[in-house]
Amino acid sequence: YEFKIVGWSINYQDSISKIIQAYKNSSELKFIHISDEGFITLEENKFKKIFLGNQPEKIDLKLKLISEIRTQLKNKEFFGKIDNLDLTDINNVTLKVFKP
């Protein structure tokens, strides 16, 4: 499968590698965006946008949380209506659901 990376820098090589490894058996990942300040945003099929923030030391925990949240929500009817998942503050995870 294909995905794009915008903002690639040697400084973020470890984080990008971990993200790719987390999605290696899935075609969900569409886009990795890294801002000039190091803020990482993912775009994928299920959660649309995932905001990981700019804490590379917590990337492993945040990727694990994505997997666990996906598993818990897998059979929920609103799963396809999720607009974004905000993991910038792991003590205050926010899931935004689109309401028509």
Image: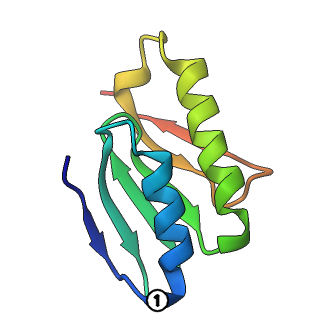
Q: How many marks?
A: 1
Location of the C terminus by quadrant is top left
Query: Circle 1: is it few (<14), some (14-19), or many (20+) Cα within 10 Å?
Result: few
| Residue 35: percent from left, percent from top | 43, 82
- Regarding residue 16, the answer to whether it shows in the image is yes
Picture residue at 73% right of the left edge, 71% below the top: 57
Residue that numbered label 1 is attached to: 10
Structure colour scheme: rainbow
Apparent side of residue 16 relative to residue 87 in the rendered image (left or right) = left
Q: Residue furthest right?
A: 91
| Residue 85: percent from left, percent from top | 52, 45
Up/down of 63 relative to 37, above or below:
above
| Residue 80: percent from left, percent from top | 34, 24
Q: Quadrant of residue 65?
A: top right
Picture residue at 41% right of the left edge, 39% below the top: 47
| Residue 48: percent from left, percent from top | 35, 44
Indicate the amino acid at tag 1: Ile
Nearer-the-camera pick, 58 or 85: 58
Name the secondary structure under disc 1: helix
Apparent side of residue 19 relative to residue 1 in the rendered image (left or right) = right
Apparent side of residue 65 relative to residue 30 in the rendered image (left or right) = right
Nearer-the-camera pick, 35 or 16: 16
Up/down of 30 relative to 35, above or below:
above
Q: Quadrant of residue 53?
A: bottom right
Apparent side of residue 25 relative to residue 72 in the rendered image (left or right) = left
Up/down of 89 relative to 75, above or below:
below
Q: Residue furthest left?
A: 2
Nearer-the-camera pick, 14 or 50: 14
Picture residue at 46% right of the left edge, 89% below the top: 10
Picture residue at 64% right of the left edge, 61% below the top: 59
Q: Quadrant of residue 95?
A: top right
